[in-house]
Amino acid sequence: MEFIGADVDPSTITREQLRDFIALLHQLPQRYTIIPRLKDKSLDELVEIAAEEELPLLSPTTVKKKFVFINSLFSHAEQEEWIDKNRAAGITVQKGKSKQRVPYRPEELQAIFDETQGAERPSDYWCPRISLTTGMRSNEILQLTKADVKQAGDVWYLDVNTELDTETGEDKKAETANSQRKIPVPQVLIDAGFLEYVQSVDNGRLFPCVALAAADGTYSFTYSKRFNPMLKRLGLKPKTDEQIIRDFHSFRHTFRANARAYEISKENAELLGGWKSQKERTAGDNYGLHYESFMVELRDNINKIDYSEITL
C-alpha cells in the first residue's frame, strides 16, 4: 500500500510496478520488521539506512517468499473477479546473492545530465548534479533553503541542519547525527550557475516544486517518482534478475568512489558525506572543524575531483 498507494484501483497495477516492488524488496535490510529502530521507518528510509550503514539485505529467498504473498493475493482477487487478470502470475524472483548498489560510470552520468539539461523543474536539473559533486542524499538536497547556502570568507557552503522546515512546521529530517554538516559548494557547481540559481529563488526551500510525500513525510519519496522512471527511459535501471542496484543513492556511492580515486583523506571524505563512522570522533577531533580555515581545506579537497570526462 505504501509503495503503490492506498487508493489505487488494483486492476490498474502493472507488471512493471510489481517488478519495481521486487527491486525495492531487494534493497531492504534484514529483520527490518523486528529490529526496534527500523520497525517504524518508511520504505525509503529503510533503503537509505541499509545503504548508509551497509546492513545485510534481504536474501533472494526471503524476497521470493514475500512476493509469493503478493502473487497469492492477486490470484485470489482474480478468482473472486475483483480484478480481470492476475498480473503477478509468472513474475519470478531470481536466486543468488543479495544485490549490491553500484556507482555510476561516466557514460551513465552523461546520459542523465543530457536528459536533464534544460529541465522544466529545477529539481530535475540540480539534484543529480548536487548529489554527484557533494555526496548529499536526495532529501537533504530537497530540504535546503535559500538561507542554508552560506558564505565563510570566500567559501560558499551548504549548511545541512535540522532547523525548522517552515513548510511542514517540523524540524528537517537528518539520517544520523553526522548528517548535520557544512559542505563547501564545489567549483564545478558554481561554474554551472548554482549560486545564480540560489539568488533567483524566493526565501524558503530551493526546490519548492517537490512537495512533501504523504506516504512517509519526505521530499525524496516524491522526487523518486520522477527520477526512477527517467532511469528506465535511459535504460539505466537494472532488470530484476540483475544483482545490482542503481538509483539516486548511487550518486552518493559515486562521490565516495571519486573521493578515494582523487586521494581525499578518509577523514575529510567522511566529514563531507556525513558517514556513520564519524560518530566515533572525540571532542578533540571535532575542535576547529567549523573555522573558516578548515572550510577552506574541505573546499580544496572537494575540488580535487575532476569531472572533465562529463559535461554537467
Image (spheres, grey):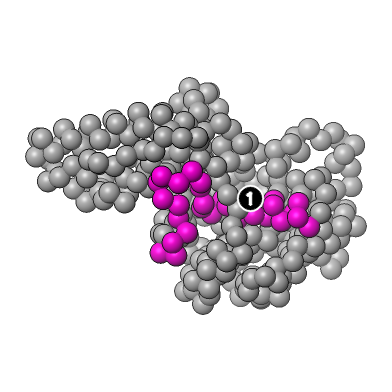
The N terminus lies in which quarter of the figure? top left
Q: Which residue position holds label 1? A: 253
Identify the element where label 1 is drawn. helix
Instruction: Tell which of 154 and 57 is nearer to you.
Output: 57
- Inspect the magenta stretch and tell me whether residue 242 lies in it: yes
Where residue 166 sits: x, y (%)? 56, 54
In percent of the image, x 71 and y 56: which residue is there? 258
Instruction: Tell which of 241 and 205 is nearer to you.
Output: 241
> From which residue to which does the magenta span run?
233-262
Give the class, few, some or many, for how many residues have Cα within 10 Å of label 1's Cα (few <14, many ≥20): many
Where residue 209 sits: x, y (%)? 48, 64
Residue 145 seen: no
Image: 36 above or below 271: above
In percent of the image, x 39 and y 38: which residue is there? 94
- Inspect the magenta stretch and tell me whether residue 294 lies in it: no
Residue kind at label 1, given as amino acid type: His
Q: Is residue 270 left or right of residue 247?
A: right
In percent of the image, x 58 and y 33: which residue is there? 55
Image: 34 above or below 48: above
The C terminus lies in which quarter of the figure? bottom right
Residue 301 seen: yes
Instruction: Tell which of 76 and 136 is nearer to you.
Output: 76
Q: Residue furthest front?
A: 96
In percent of the image, x 67 and y 70: which residue is there? 309
Where residue 152 sits: x, y (%)? 83, 62
Total numbered circles: 1
Q: Is residue 65 left or right of residue 122?
A: left
